Amino acid sequence: MLGALDPTAPTPLGHDSLLRRVAAEPVTALLVQRALVMEVAHPMVGAGVDHHSGFRTQPYRRAWATADAALRLLFGDDGTARGAARQIYAVHDHINGELGHDVGPWPQGTAYSAHDAELLTWVWATLVDTALVGYERWVRPLRADEADAFYGEMKAMARFLGIPDSLLPAGRTEFAAYLEHVLDDPALGSGTVSRALARQILWYRHWSVPAPVVRLERVLALATLDPRLLERLDLHPSPSDEALGRRVDGWLAAGYRHLPRPGTSLPRLYVRLRAVRVPVGSGVGRRLRRRWG
């Protein structure tokens, strides 16, 4: 089953959206590596990233393109969000191929596609789980009604992105069961490609990316990932990383929630400013279009 966009669907998020408030918390960005490791642990997703992603050689361009699309999707109006969704699908049009070797229940040669609705559901689930882990761990626990509202908005966003409702767990209880089922599956994290990608993400090396930033996200990812996944991916923190992870986790849990809440004004301002048209014929316009398309 393939995901398919509904070109008439309105964005499901309003100005008082809880999902927007969660996504606007800078601390949730500290778990980007965690979400990425969960995603590539699925052998089919890992194959797509391994064959098609440019994160190894163009880290900033790849990260900025992802962040830009996410901000427009979450904080834009209907037209802006639909444009971001179409951009994501246009990128996914080129992400397809075959497994190079047997992995779990998938034999060598099994075809994969970034439009596969089940794979999209898993990627979506990693974002749901990671956002909740970061927010509830370091900002505050959500009340039951808030958690239901957050999950409902995440489901609505999944449908907006073309994931069939039939694949989405009905509620938080069903989502927890789905996540447990996938995490308990020995195929998740069992492939050599997934293991290699997870290490590349967590111990990323590039001259332009500061090593302390990579290490900060690594220690927090290792501190919050499911132990079963860490074991299958053969991810074991060094004693110094484990100690640093505990310290940073403790500092964030004790102090971050006392800082003023950032609100959603800055990401919404970014989306508005991005929409400002630069004349195509100007030097600035030409440079922006060449760089960001």
Image: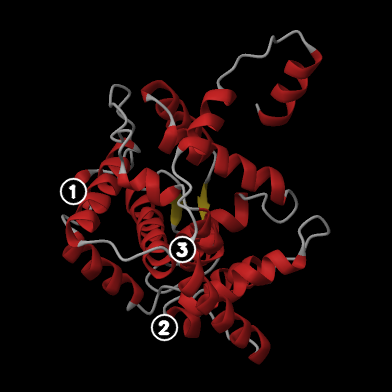
Q: Nearer the viewer, residue 99 or 159?
A: 159
Q: Is residue 165 visible?
A: yes
**SS type, badge 3:** helix
Where is mark 1, residue-wise?
166
**Residue position marked by numbered label 3 in the rendering:** 258
The quadrant of the rendering that contains the C terminus is top right
**Residue at 49% from the left image edge and 81% from the top image edge:** 230
- Give the label, 2 or 3, closer to the camera: 3
**x and y percent of residue 170 in the render?**
16, 55
72 left or right of 117 in image: right
Residue pictured at 67% horizontal, 30% vertical: 292
Label 1: state its secondary structure.
Answer: helix
- Residue at the image point whose x is 53% and y is 56% from the top: 29
Image coords of residue 68 (percent x, y): 56, 37
Tell me if mark 3 has few (under 14), some (14-19) or many (20+) residues whose alpha carbon lies within 10 angstroms of its own. Answer: few
What residue lies at 73% left-to-right and 68% top-to-bottom? 212
The secondary element bearing badge 2 is classed as: helix
Within the image, what quadrant is residue 291 found in? top right
- Location of residue 279 with respect to 186 vertically, above or below: above
Q: Residue furthest bottom?
A: 239
Seen as rendered, the residue at the extreme right is 207
Could you give the CA–CA distance between mark 3 and mark 1, rounded to whole angstroms?
40 Å
Q: Quadrant of residue 119?
A: bottom left
Q: How many marks?
A: 3
**Kind of residue at disc 2:** Arg
Name the N-terminal-most of marks 2 and 1: 1
Q: Where residue 95 sits in the image (x, y, percent)? A: 53, 44
For discs 3 and 1, the disc positioned in front in the rendered view = 3
